[in-house]
Amino acid sequence: MTDIEHQSEKEKLSQLHGKAKVEYILTYYRIYFIFALIAVIVVVIIANAVENAKRESRIGVAVLNASSYDLQAADDWQNRLAQELGFGEYEYATVTMLNYPTEDSQMTEESIASQEKLMTMVAVKQIDMIIAPESLNRSFMENVDYFLDLSTYLPEDIYSKLQEEGRIETLTNSEGQTFPALISMTPEEISSEISLQMDSPTIGIVANSENKDNTIRLLRRFLGLQS
């Protein structure tokens, strides 16, 4: 805008009042407002991207098919885990509550979305531990080797205790080999950490888990063992 054009606009504005003045400003300077808004949005997006790039998930837990649960309680547990496990400023825990479809359940948009979400999160290594009814966790091994061999993954003291208490559940992998894959839990042990109800809860450690230390620390909490 030249000085003459700028002066002309100032004169026009000086002659307008009230609503007419506001409408003129919004009309004439709309493009400048739009550019300014876009610039602000771009700055915010870049700032958020930089901030999120610093953040790292240190443990991911998927809780499937609880008969009752409170999403706020899940959020509180997620935040508490990050604090009590000693995570840093840019480290966090992920707790995902899903209603996963089963052979006996009716397929809904929600259950299909839950199925796709879990598969995606496991694929990108955002889930380390799955807490689900035994029948559901068993079904995951039908087409893919979903869980780790607990005999090689767990520390000796935890594994021995689970064996002594008869808590180890075996599954068969794609090569026909039977291995210890699931940990039987009591509903009370699960609800002591997070407020929910679940029938025949079990815990499985997903095959591509990358957060072994924190996963074992959380398992010790469930079992009442000192780390």
Image (cartoon, rainbow, N blue to C red):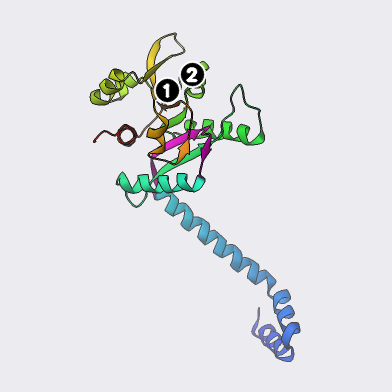
Horizontal side of residue 31 vs 88, given as left or right: right
In this rendering, the answer to whether 55 lies above or below 214 is below
Residue 35 placement (x, y as % from top left): 62, 66
Horizontal side of residue 105 vs 188, given as left or right: right
Q: Decide which of 223, 34 is in the foreground and name it.
A: 223
Mark 2 highlights which residue? 141
State the image quarter where residue 102 is shown.
top right
Give the number of the disc on residue 127. none
| Residue 205 visible in this rendered orientation of the protein | no
In this rendering, the answer to whether 45 lies above or below 155 is below
Q: Disc 2 vs disc 1: Cβ atoms closer than 8 Å?
A: yes
Element assignment for label 2:
helix
Mark 1 highlights which residue? 147
Mark 1 residue type: Phe
Q: Decide which of 182, 90 is in the foreground and name it.
A: 182
Crowding at mark 1 (Cα within 10 Å: few <14, some 14-19, many 20+): many
Q: Decide which of 65, 16 is in the foreground and name it.
A: 65
Horizontal side of residue 175 vs 214, given as left or right: right
Q: Mark 1 or mark 2, which is nearer the start of the sequence?
A: 2
Dominant secondary structure (helix, strand or loop) of the stretch shown in magenta: strand
Crowding at mark 2 (Cα within 10 Å: few <14, some 14-19, many 20+): some
Residue 62 on the magenta segment: yes
Element assignment for label 1:
loop
Q: Which residues are magenta?
A: 55-70
| Residue 161 visible in this rendered orientation of the protein | yes
Q: Residue at x 68, y 69 (%)?
A: 31
Q: Residue at x 35, y 21 (%)?
A: 167
Mark 2 residue type: Met
Q: Residue at x 47, y 12 (%)?
A: 174
